[in-house]
Amino acid sequence: MFLKISKRILIGYGILFIISQILSSCLTFKVKQKEIDEKFAGYAQMPVQHQIEEKGISMNYAEIGSDSLPVAFFVHGSPGSWGAFIDFMRDTTLLKKVKMVSVDRVGFGESDFGDAEKSLMVQAELLKPIVAKYKKLGKKIILIGHSLGGPLIARMAMDYPELIDNLIIVAGSIAPELEPNEKWFRIPMEIVPIRFLVPASFRASNHEILYLKPELEKMLPLWKNIRQPVIVIQGGKDVLVSPKNADFAEKMLVNTKSLKVVRVDTMNHFVPWSHPQLIKKAIIESL
């Protein structure tokens, strides 16, 4: 009887594993060259992907535009990839004003896919050489971070102020006290075999979100060090990141040269897709 039950359990796990692998292949958020070719057919330019080795990790990013222009540097949320901002790269008005760079954060896209880094400080270290490459050209660097990309760009401004000129935080999860208690389902997702039944992109996402609150707490004494101009964009209908994060930004950014908070009561969390014009306007205002 026990052997029969064990066999059924093993078969069940086997079926779940196969399903998870199928889902993993569909939910990678990776940008294929075919998609790039299709989206930019008929356009004068298309994004080109590059890799840079840092701390033994190959970090992937895409760029488009002239080296003579300021740089709009996009950092995606969780899960995601550089492709979250691919439609901005087709905006001919923006391309006349900025060079655009979008990264795969570690654990996502083509940057060590599936193996996330919980430390925001380390994530900032991994992005530093990419940002520094463009800063060496002597151009303004504008960081745009969506969702978990929000606290990451703030961490970059705290740790590497000499590289950053402006911040645009979009639906950013920046306040530790506003992080929901989701340990009841996130901790089990870290345990074998459940961990390997979860699609790799969501496995990476679960890992970094599980540890996000203590990472945000480490940043609390550093907010006063941010002096760059900041624009915060937040939706009132955001159910993934509390709208009160915008209030937190107003409270903590006491030494910034300027702070503008854009609140839209009817807007949800997915601002880059639902309200791209707000991000575009913020980029232009930051020039």
Image: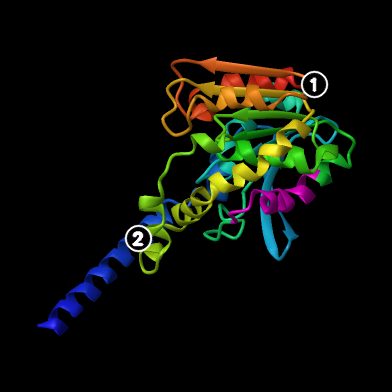
- Which class describes the residues within 10 Å of circle 2: few (<14), some (14-19), or many (20+)? some
> Which residue is at the front of the view, 128 or 284?
128
Residue nearer the viewer, 52 or 220: 220
Type of amino acid at the residue the image marks with label 2? Ser
Q: Secondary structure at mark 2?
A: helix
The answer to which image quadrant residue 76 occupies is top right
Q: Which residues are magenta?
A: 117-131
Tell me which amino acid carries mark 1: Lys
Quarter of the image where one finds residue 23: bottom left
For image coordinates 35% across by 60% down, the residue present is: 20
On the rendered structure, is 85 left or right of 242? right
Residue 206 image point, x, y percent:
46, 52
Whether residue 30 appears in magenta in the rendering, the answer is no
Observer able to see residue 188? yes
The residue tagged 1 is 257
Q: Is residue 119 magenta?
A: yes
Colour pattern of the rendering: rainbow
Q: Is residue 137 left or right of residue 159?
A: right
First reached walking from the N terminus: tag 1 or tag 2: 2
Magenta stretch prevailing secondary structure: helix
Q: Which mark is residue 20?
A: 2
Residues at discs 1 and 2 in contact (Cβ within 8 Å) = no
What residue is shown at x 24% (from left), y 75% (from top)?
A: 10
> In the rendered image, which quarter contains the N terminus?
bottom left
